[in-house]
Amino acid sequence: GLQQFGSVSAIDLPGFGLTPPAGRSTTVEANRRVLDRYLRLLGQPVTLIGNSMGGAIALRQAARAPETVSRLVLVSPAAPWDLVVQPPDPLAGAMFAMYAVPGLAELVMWGRRNAMTPEEIARWVLDLCAAHPERIPRDVFEMHVRMAVQRQHIPGIDEAFIRAARS
C-alpha cells in the first residue's frame, strides 16, 4: 500500500466513518478545522488525499492553510459545480437537491436505512462515488459493508451527514 512511500494515517472526522458527531458540528468547514488541528500536530506538510466530501475538505484545507499541504490528491471530490460548463451526475445532483430540503432529507436517510441492507448501502455509495465501482476489490467492498453495519448504531450519524451535505 501507500506505506512504502512514507508514514500514512487516516483521520476519521466527526460524523464520518465511525466517529460520532457527539454534539460537534459536521459541516465541511468544521471538519476542515479538525483536520487543520491534526495536520498542525504533525508539524510538517503532508500529501493530503480526499475522496468525495473528504475531497471538499482537503481542497479547503489546501486553500486556507497551504503550509500544511505539500501535495493534494482529490478523488471524486464533492466540489461546487459550474452548472453551465458541466452539470453534475444526475443521481448526485438529485441527492444533493433532496439533502437541501428540510424534512425530505431526513425522510431519504430514514428510507435508505430502513429499506436497504448494509450490502445494498455499500454498493449504492460505491456506485455513486466511484467512476468504476466494478474495479473495487471484494475485500474493499466487504470493509464498506462492515462500516455500514457499524454506522447503523451511531447516534446522530444521519443528521451529521445531512448537515455536512448542506454545508
Image (cartoon, rainbow, N blue to C red):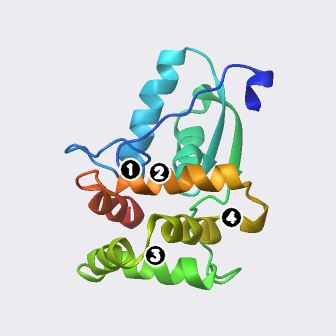
Q: Determine if residue 131 is in view.
A: no
Task: From the image, state whether disc 4 or disc 3 is nearer to you.
Answer: 4
User: In the rendered image, which residue does mark 3 sit on?
Assistant: 96
Name the amino acid type tagged 2: Met
Image height of 166 relative to 102, above or below = above
Q: Secondary structure at mark 1?
A: helix
User: In the rendered image, which residue does mark 2 sit on?
Assistant: 147
User: In the rendered image, which residue does mark 1 sit on?
Assistant: 150
Q: Nearer the viewer, residue 98 or 150?
A: 150
> Which numbered dot is residue 93?
none
The numbered mark, 4 or 2, whose residue comes first in the sequence reads 4
| Residue 6 in the image, given as x and y percentages of width and height | 74, 20
**Does the CB distance between marks 2 and 1 fall below 8 Å?**
yes
Q: Determine if residue 71 is in view.
A: yes
Image height of 98 relative to 76, above or below = below
Task: From the image, state whether disc 3 or disc 2 is nearer to you.
Answer: 2
The numbered mark, 3 or 2, whose residue comes first in the sequence reads 3
Task: From the image, state whether disc 4 or disc 2 is nearer to you.
Answer: 2
The numbered mark, 4 or 1, whose residue comes first in the sequence reads 4
